[in-house]
Amino acid sequence: MKDFIEGSDAVARAVALCRPGVISAYPITPQTHIVEFLASMVADGKLKSQFINVESEHSAASLVLGASAAGERVFSASSSQGLILMSEVLFNIAGMRMPVVLACVNRALSAPINIWNDQQDSMAVRDSGWIQLYAETGQECGDLIFQAYRLAESPEVRVPVMVCLDGYLLSHGLEVVDVPEAAEVDKFLPPYRPTEKLDPAVPMTFGPLAGPDYYLEIRHDLHAAMRGALKLIPSIAADFSRQFGRNSGGLVEAYRLEDAELAIVAAGSVCGTIKEAIDALRQEGVKAGLLRLVTYRPFPEEAVSAALAGVGRVAVLDKAISLGATGPIYADLATALVRGKHQARVNGYIAGLGGRDITIETIREIFTRLSGEEVSAGFVGLKG
Amino acid sequence: MSQTYLFKRTEGLQDAPTSFCPGCGHGILLRLVAELVWELGLRGRTVGVAPVGCAVTAYDYWNFDVTEAAHGRAPAVATGIKRVHPDRLVFTYQGDGDLAAIGTAEIVHAANRGENLTTVFVNNAVYGMTRGQMAPTTMLGQKTTTTAAGRDPRQHGYPLRVCEMLAGLDGVVYLERLALSDPASVRRIKAAIRKGFECQLSGQGFSLIEVLSPCPVNWNLSPVDSLTYVREVMSPVFPPGVIKDRTCQKPAPGV
């Protein structure tokens, strides 16, 4: 059923259709609406789930870890400072291979305090062992939730998944979203039947001490599971497309790249703006294209390398920065192109931090600068 | 012709428009703190630590030094400041979401260490800034955006009484709870905060003044009805009064 709703509502309705047994989160702007929608559904009896209010994000993450270990499908959501406060537990959830799904409503980090959108929060936990998917539209916010549970709970993966959506732009922006029927979702997402869980009948320990003798192997297993997800993500997206009749998710999306001479690489809602800019540039005879990263962790090196074959100049737009180095996507992309033996010139640009608008003009500026100075972390729109 | 001012802005406040909702208690409480800093002659010697929550922009109003802290960590930040500058008046100003939820550990341990700090604790029984979700201090039966059917103790536990919880700690010198519910209470609250500041200035140790404060927008009540709510609904659950007082007139030894 199509409805005119905000991205937060699309996430909440998708989560409800996945029927997690336990939901726990701590309110933080701009994630709050997701929590409120889910709390309302539980209160109205529309969602049979335990919604548990706790005193902090650290506790919310710990609580869903426990519930997941006990064998339940679980959900949490956070943003910015909240996600960073969770970060200790995020590493535990991944290390213990709990198939938790969490929505991160992307927001800048303090200090200075800022409640507006960039992607520094999720980028800061990119090494935690969570799969990270970035939505472009309100529709994709919901669609990625279905795919996230299917992916996280696949026995060959069993890794937590973070669905990232840009704060306000997606979380509060209203769009027409097709919300599927419960029966359709049930066909796509089987009930959660964990192969390992805390069960007194089959005693088991999660996350025990691992010394120098085995820690390395356990981390290798997690890395291998993440790399293995690179095969499963496209097949889950293809299944989704077959069943629901629309494309969402996957590793990357190539937009007008076939004959492109210039390309931008980016993730999230800014890709909608980039597509508009590219359409305009194409009319002016500029052969521009976009490579949208849907999956950022695991990093889809081969898909990226293949999609950018033949592109002469590549601009990476990061809405985050590894301070003192480059944007995180730039670093990963440059590595992938070197390994793919590309000759493309790759420039890195930092834009949109703390909610600074990225407009079609900003994108045009990036394409213009791409023909000029070589930069790895060129700030765009910096005031004098 | 001479003019007589019956009411004017204290110099402790900057000339800035307020961002608070109509009927909110923060405007009064921030002003009381500002008046006291000026009346005690502590301009230039005061450092406030602001919370995360509705009072996050306290530095936009107060006309003295303020630092931000991560959500709930104001007592730890204040400890760091006070240990470096023991001659300054250092206080935290925190809401119940900041102090009684995410920051419970920090307030307990700053109090237990007997840090020579003052905390102004503004309890309005909801998370205000994020628009009215349940807090640990929410009343039983109170409807919030995360307890649509009202707070149920079997699901959500009970209202957390911070003063009573801290009273058993040996490091705590002075605890008082007051209800912001009428003009007379404003004067009592000012006297209590003054006592907390003086407790610190004479080196006696940790003090906390809890104020039950109206939040009309998130309670879905008019400003006037909110004052009645503070008096008739919140006050029986969080009884106003001096919870603990070990202050003495003389400065503590060695100070």
Image (cartoon, coloured by chain):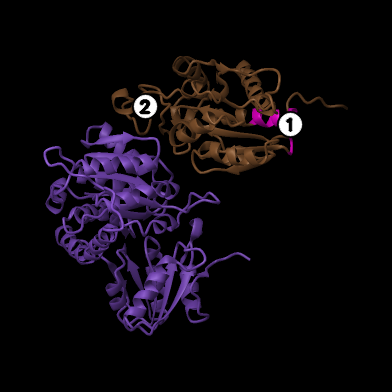
Structural distance between the alpha carbons of marks 1 and 2: 40 Å
> Is residue B223 visible from the viewing direction of this image?
yes
Circle 2 is placed at which residue position?
Answer: B143
- Where does the image place residue A186, in percent across and percent down from the top left? 13, 48
At x 73%, y 31%, the residue is B38
Residue range (magenta): B31-44
Indicate the amino acid at tag 1: Trp
At x 37%, y 75%, the residue is A335
Location of residue B35 with respect to A254 vertically, above or below: above
Chain B is shown in which shade? brown
What chain is colored purple? A
> Is residue B51 visible from the viewing direction of this image?
no
Q: Helix, strand or loop at disc 2?
A: loop
* Image mark 2: chain: B
Question: What secondary structure do most residues of the magenta stretch adopt?
Answer: helix
* N-term-proximal mark, 1 vs 2: 1
- Is A179 positioned to the left or the right of B140 in the image? left
Location of residue B45 with respect to B114 vertically, above or below: below
- Where does the image place residue A61, in percent across and percent down from the top left? 33, 44
B36 inside magenta stretch: yes
Location of residue B166 with respect to A149 vertically, above or below: above
User: Which mark identifies residue B38?
Assistant: 1
- Is B44 positioned to the left or the right of A327 in the image? right
Indicate the amino acid at tag 2: Lys
A172 and A228: which one is in front? A228
